[in-house]
């Protein structure tokens, strides 16, 4: 499995039988295979997670499927293969003989849209979108409520055996790593990719020294391209 961080929360995940593209709205795509299905996920319609560039992908790829939040699905051009999803849903997608069936579970975001748990080609991937512990400069009770909501949604997938997880680490927050720490506490993953830090990569990477993340240091990835063992 290859993982490429494109920009902000945009990631490409290359599996043996299909490619996954999450929340891509800007930046250059890696040289993805053209002979396997490309499944495009959009967690919500915020401009830093969704761009209309996704609808042009069939010009370059022969088999493109879309799994997108319902607000984004409403904007799809005619002729696109679009699965409109809502929060707290379970979906199955037949990707064909080689890739088999993809299973998708959605969680409710405490911002907008959904988070995704995806099982495909023998791998399980969690993509958080804007579901996170949003610890802003505001009353403590609101921040604590944000964490309770986050943990409560994660309990729905607590028994998932996750290979790769993509979770926000936003340096603007009062507590940038609270989301990753809570995610690892409730669900866990073999490998974890921080996201949602725009151009502030240096500040975001410094946050990884937080002692709460020390037990997972070997699992945290900040490189732009990463090959994960099978």
Image: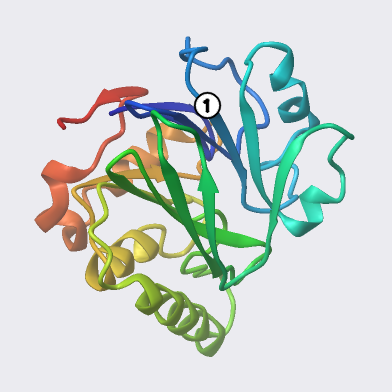
Percent x, y for residue 12? Answer: 46, 29
* Quarter that holds the C terminus: top left
Where is residue 41, by image quadrant? top right
Residue positioned 46% across, 64% down in the render = 174
The picture quadrant where one finds residue 213 is bottom left
Q: Is residue 39 left or right of residue 176?
A: right
Which residue is denoted by mark 1 in the rendering?
37
Task: Determine whether, in the image, residue 87 is placed left or right of residue 36.
Answer: right
Identify the residue at image location x=41%, y=39%: 100
Compared with 73, 89 (above or below) is below
Q: Residues within 10 Å of mark 1 (few under 14, many from 20)?
A: many
| Image mark count | 1
Residue 201 in the image: state x and y as whole percent: 43, 33
Residue at x 63% of width, y 28% of height: 64
x, y (%) of residue 207? Answer: 31, 48
Q: Say which of 50 and 145 sits in front.
A: 50
* Horizontal and vertical percent position of residue 202: 39, 33
Up the image or down, 143 lies above or below 60; here it is: below
Label 1 SS: loop
Q: How is the image coloured?
A: rainbow
Q: Quadrant of the N terminus?
A: top left
Left or right relative to 57: residue 211: left
Which picture quadrant has residue 130? Answer: bottom right
Q: Residue furthest bottom?
A: 141
State the residue at coordinates (43%, 29%). Answer: 18
Image vertical order of residue 34 relative to residue 225, above or below? above
């Amino acid at each position: 499995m290859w993982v490429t961080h494109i920009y902000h929360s945009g990631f490409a995940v290359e599996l043996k039988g299909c490619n996954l593209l999450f929340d891509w709205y800007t930046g250059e795509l890696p040289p993805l295979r053209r002979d396997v299905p490309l499944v495009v996920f959009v967690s919500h319609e915020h401009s830093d997670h969704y761009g209309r560039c996704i609808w042009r992908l069939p010009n370059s790829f022969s088999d493109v499927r879309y799994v997108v939040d319902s607000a984004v699905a409403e904007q799809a051009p005619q002729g696109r293969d679009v699965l409109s999803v809502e929060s707290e849903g379970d979906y199955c997608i037949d990707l064909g003989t080689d890739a088999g069936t993809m299973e998708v579970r959605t969680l409710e975001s405490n911002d907008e849209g959904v988070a995704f748990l995806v099982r495909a080609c023998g791998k399980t991937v969690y993509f958080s979108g804007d579901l996170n512990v949003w610890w802003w400069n505001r009353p403590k009770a609101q921040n604590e409520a944000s964490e309770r909501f986050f943990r409560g949604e994660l309990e729905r997938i607590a028994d998932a055996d996750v290979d790769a997880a993509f979770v926000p680490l936003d340096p603007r927050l009062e507590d940038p790593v609270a989301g990753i720490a809570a995610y690892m506490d409730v669900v866990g993953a073999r490998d974890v990719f921080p996201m949602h830090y725009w151009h502030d990569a240096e500040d975001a990477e410094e946050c990884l020294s937080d002692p709460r993340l020390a037990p997972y240091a070997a699992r945290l990835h900040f490189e732009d391209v990463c090959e994960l063992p099978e």
